[in-house]
Image (spheres, grey):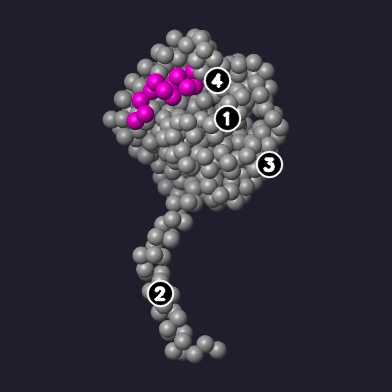
Amino acid sequence: MLHRRQFIKSTGWATAFALSPFAQNLIDDMTKKKKKLGVQLFSIPQMVDKDLKGTLHLLSEIGYKEVEFFGPYPFSAPETIEGWKGLAAQLGIKRNAFYGYSIPEIKSMLSDFKLKTPSMHLDLITFRKNLKTTLDAVAPLGVKYLALPALSDINDRRTLDHYKRLAEEFNGFGQQMATYGMAFVYHNHGFEHAKMDGVVPMDYLLQNTDNKNVKFELDIFWMSAAGADPVDYLNRYPGRFKLMHIKDAAEKVRFTGDGGTPDQWMAVFSKMADPGTGVFDIQRMLQAGQKSGVEHFFLERDLTPTPEATLKNSFANLSKMNF
């Protein structure tokens, strides 16, 4: 049995250590290294459509800390809302975000489950026509980034001149968003790596947009499907990628062409896998992301056929990785 004097001495030392600057620095370092994992809700669209509150509760219970919404929203451009209806029907989704809830209700719900939404996806038409309305709407949620998930209209990306105009537009969006404390984000989808006039459009966008107000979301799957190396881009453009979408591939994946058409995207959907179960060196990519300045890491296994299993397996696998 520990002698009373020894017990007091040892517990006193432990208390002093716990309160010391050294211990506090150690705790701070451990906290900083523990990344907050998030989920892009397009991974589980039917779940959030059916029961947003219950799904957010589940994400919180599993251990996720952040969510990334996808549109359209009540404030999206009318053309976007109308154009989404066909795809939504195919996916079995009946409602648009925020699934019948108001912004104050969403804010309260996120707070209740200790979740944050640092970024949201927004289509290009809405960026062009309803940006101020969108910024006013989402500002109360504490959103830092609005991300353009893809250039869905090929007429926006037919030539290098189109990408040059896009770079100017992105800078304009970012400048307007800066007044709200937000930044514009572009999410790669693969086709940006097909050379045009000897130039890789993805590199052009990175090199010709404002570093302060325009950032990027790196989707490791789509970039790999285009034949590019995510780690290479993270190393070459430090500070530009603030968000990362994480999913794995069951086998080596490449587009049959330039990755610019929906049929090419759909052809590789079946090759997606939960992070940590496929052929990607996920930890290497995460470590490169952390070193490059990525702030938010989101699971995004698009339309996963096993929603709850993917959420749980992915969190368990990613939590074990050192980054």
Q: Residue at x 31, y 25 (%)?
A: 175
Viewer-proximal residue among 34 and 305: 34
Q: On residue 278, which mark appears?
A: none
Pointer 2 with pointer 4, Cβ within 8 A: no
Q: Which numbered disc flags the more N-terminal residue, 2 or 1?
A: 2
Task: Please name the residue that numbered disc 4 is placed on.
Answer: 193
Q: Is residue 301 above or below residue 206?
A: below
- Local crowd at mark 2 within 10 Å, few (<14), some, or many (≥20)? few
Q: Residue at x 60, y 51 (%)?
A: 320
Task: Please name the residue that numbered disc 2 is placed on.
Answer: 15
Q: Position of residue 77 (x, y in %)?
A: 42, 19
Q: Is residue 307 magenta?
A: no
Q: Position of residue 125 (x, y in %)?
A: 43, 17
Q: Amino acid at mark 3?
A: Thr
Q: Amino acid at mark 2?
A: Thr
How far is disc 1 from disc 4 in space, using C-alphas? Answer: 11 Å
Q: Amino acid at mark 1?
A: Asp
How far is disc 1 from disc 3 in space, using C-alphas? Answer: 19 Å
Query: In the visual, does 305 lie left or right of 233?
Result: right
How far is disc 3 from disc 2 in space, using C-alphas? Answer: 43 Å
Q: On residue 229, which mark appears?
A: 1
Q: Amino acid at mark 4?
A: His
Q: Provide the residue span drawn in magenta.
A: 201-212
Q: Which numbered disc flags the more N-terminal residue, 3 or 2?
A: 2
